[in-house]
Amino acid sequence: MTGPAGPLSGVRIVEAASFVAAPSAGMALGQLGADVIRVDPPGGGSDAGRWPLSAGGASLFWANLNKGKRSVTIDHRREEGRELLLELVTSSGPQGGVYVDNLVGARRLRYEQLAERRPDVIHVHVEGRRNGKPAVDYSINAEVGVPVMTGPADAAVPVNHVLPAWDLVTGMLTVSAVTAALYRRERSGEGARIDVALADVALAGVAGMGWLAEADELGRPRARVGNHMYGSFGVDFATADGRRIMVVALTEGQWNALRRVTGTEGVFAALEQSLDADLDREGDRYRLRETIASILRPWFEARDYATLERLLDDAKVLWSPYRDMAELAAEARGATDGIVSEIEQPGIGPMLAASAPWRWNQVSPPALAAPVLSADTDTVLTEVLGLTGAEIGRLRTAGIV
């Protein structure tokens, strides 16, 4: 929602961050209308060239996580650059004074330094651990137990996954923290110091799912169940033409729809009687998941994908096809009512990109291009800090910007 219609229109946010969590927060805040100024050292931060790369070698990762922002380069590792960043964050104006970072080390800006210049400053600091030690999604995910819950039942090693889920959740919690702090500041004039540790987000996540309490009560970890959905019925099936689909029956209605379309109502009624089970209950469907899957599997294997698509949709079964990323890209490109479109990205050319995943008053904002690194340095320093061309030129000569 960047632009006049955005609910955060007029709010200025300075972001000094890299990788996923904090930059994803900055992008979402920008999509809500805020003016997000990303600050990197000259030459770019540690994620400037992160994979995946375009055919020309530019980072598709960077371009997609920084859409709609403005880019400023300041060498804040040096004293003069650090002072410049401090001035940028604490510059005057009712809608400024918001800083999101994930910087580390003694040289990073602290809340106390910011608040000394501007008492109502809002500072959200994203960190690996609450004690300041480093951590990333893939290391944290290992220690909160997810890889040893993932994979085939007979797997002897942890199974990592590629989605940085804790990073993305941390990013959205950061958005919540910024908007809540802005709301409080508007009412009370108070600033805020907010620290969000990735490790705490992950621990809260597994606790919120009940997994932590379950393991504590049982005194043992949960066993792997492969592609079966835990606690209910859901598993993958092969089709006659070699595709695979995921079928889920969470509710009693979904379970009844699946039994009706497969013509297995009588089979499952007999199974319930012989095993003293009630398959309308999620727990019994999960307990007998292997038996249920073995009964249903021949029905799926006897039909091709097109037939299954028609039958399952007509019966209102909850299901989805498995797609690889290339298939998903082709599907998204061809959709006329989705959030993906082709944009012209400087330094890359035509690029498939997504807009914000929400509709504000039934309007989806367009996907915006990411800036070229440092493209907005002169404009921002002039606009926000009132620097002259000569002053900016001196900073460039000194390598500060």
Image (cartoon, helix red, strand yellow):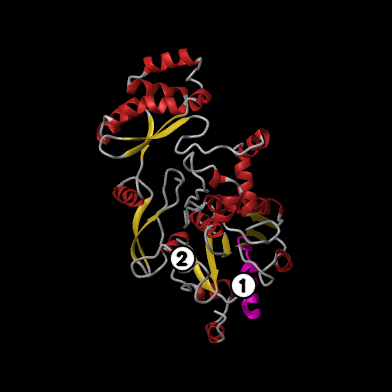
Q: Nearer the viewer, residue 328 or 373?
A: 328
Q: In the image, residue 161 lies at what x, y percent?
A: 48, 50
Q: Which residue is tagged 2?
A: 50
In the image: residue 305, left or right of residue 380: left
Asked if residue 263 is among those painted magenta in the image, a careful observer would answer no
In the image: residue 233, left or right of residue 328: right
How far apart are labels 1 and 2 at the CA level?
A: 24 Å
For the residues carrying marks 1 and 2, which lies nearer the camera in this image?
2
Q: In the image, residue 187 lies at what x, y percent?
A: 68, 50
Query: Tag on residue 104?
Result: none
Type of residue at label 2?
Arg
Q: Residues within 10 Å of mark 1 (few under 14, many from 20)?
A: many
Q: Which residue is tagged 1?
A: 85
Residues in magenta, as a range = 77-98
Type of residue at label 1?
Leu
Considering the numbered disc 1 on the image, is that residue within a helix, a strand or a loop? helix
Q: Nearer the viewer, residue 374 or 276?
A: 276
Q: Nearer the viewer, residue 261 or 79?
A: 261
